[in-house]
Image (cartoon, rainbow, N blue to C red):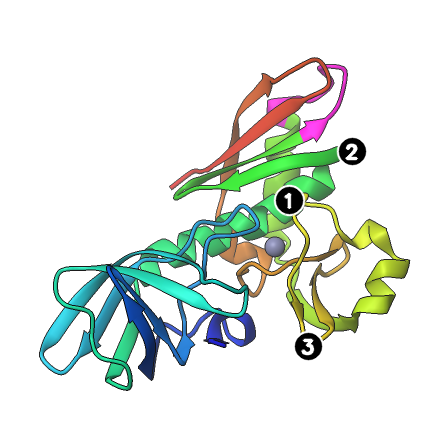
């Protein structure tokens, strides 16, 4: 399996590791800071540096099993199995994804409706809610999100046993995707005083780090569905 460094420390930008498997245009590593596409969050990009060769990581996905993380690479031959490499994130992009991901937890809390889907993009994000009426107001939602962001609520994680999660299904909500189960345990993300849910993505440490946002669009997508899109102000 690949050691998922981002799960314990999402702020770590690079790691010294070695190649455990390779194929045509891909590499797997013993450890990585690269988040693989999943749960509505896109996979990371960046570089693999080994000796005097640098490969671009153009995409990161899960491998043949969910415990394996595969880096799609371009710009040269894949390094041999066992070769030491330094995996370096495109941190600016990843940090924007962390900010938006955390903001979508706030949006989930702000809207009284079941989340049916979502997607995080670079600089924007959206959630779909199962809401029949057009009751949502862009200005009011924007103000509510920014008030929580400004209040700087701490974002913390804790782990629970799978059996506890099965007994509390309300903890699974945002992305309608099952959260990762690591060694029979599940990670919860708590935004102090606001939101608690199972999640395997990457988040910032407190809400002020998100920065100011605006609700850009509220669209009707089907009779029972409202899509809310959020963008950064900067
Ligand atoms: Zn999350």
> Cα distance, mark 2 to mark 3?
33 Å
Q: Quadrant of the C terminus?
A: top left
Q: Position of residue 198 (x, y in %)?
A: 71, 58
User: In the figure, residue 221 lies in which quadrant?
Assistant: top right
Q: Which residue is mark 3?
A: 183
Residue 40 x %, y %: 54, 45
Residue 61 drawn above or below residue 21: above
Q: Earlier in the sequence, mark 2 or mark 3?
A: 2
Side (left or right) of 40 relative to 22: right
Region in magenta: 129-139
Q: Residue at x 20, y 76 (%)?
A: 79
Most extreme residue toward the right is 167
Is 80 magenta? The answer is no
Q: Name the one closer to the observer, 112 or 53.
A: 53
Q: Indicate the secondary structure of the residue bearing disc 1.
A: loop
Relative to 189, residue 131 above or below: above
CA distance for labels 2 and 1? 15 Å
In depth, the one of 37 and 152 nearer the eye is 37
Q: Position of residue 7 (x, y in %)?
A: 54, 71
Q: Residues within 10 Å of mark 3 (few under 14, many from 20)?
A: few
Q: Earlier in the sequence, mark 2 or mark 1?
A: 2
């Amino acid at each position: 399996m690949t050691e998922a460094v981002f799960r314990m420390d999402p702020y770590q930008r690079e790691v010294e590791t070695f190649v455990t498997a390779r194929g045509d245009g891909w590499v797997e590593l013993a450890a990585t800071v690269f988040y693989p596409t999943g749960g509505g969050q896109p996979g990371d990009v960046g570089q693999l540096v080994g000796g005097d060769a640098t490969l671009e990581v153009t995409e990161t996905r899960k491998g043949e099993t969910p415990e394996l993380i595969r880096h799609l690479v371009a710009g040269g031959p894949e390094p041999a199995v066992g070769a030491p490499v330094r995996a370096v994130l495109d941190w600016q992009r990843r940090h924007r994804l962390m900010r938006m991901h955390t903001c979508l937890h706030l949006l989930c809390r702000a809207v009284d409706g079941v989340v049916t889907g979502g997607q995080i993009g670079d600089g924007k994000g959206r959630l779909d809610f199962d809401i029949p009426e057009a009751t949502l107001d862009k200005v009011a939602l924007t103000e509510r999100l920014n008030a929580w962001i400004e209040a700087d609520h701490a974002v913390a994680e804790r782990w629970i046993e799978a059996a506890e999660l099965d007994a509390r299904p309300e903890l699974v909500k945002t992305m309608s995707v099952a959260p990762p189960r690591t060694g029979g345990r599940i990670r919860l993300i708590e935004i102090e005083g606001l939101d608690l849910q199972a999640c395997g993505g990457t988040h910032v440490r407190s809400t002020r780090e998100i920065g100011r946002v605006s609700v850009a669009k509220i669209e009707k997508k089907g009779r029972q569905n409202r899509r809310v899109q959020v963008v950064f102000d900067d």
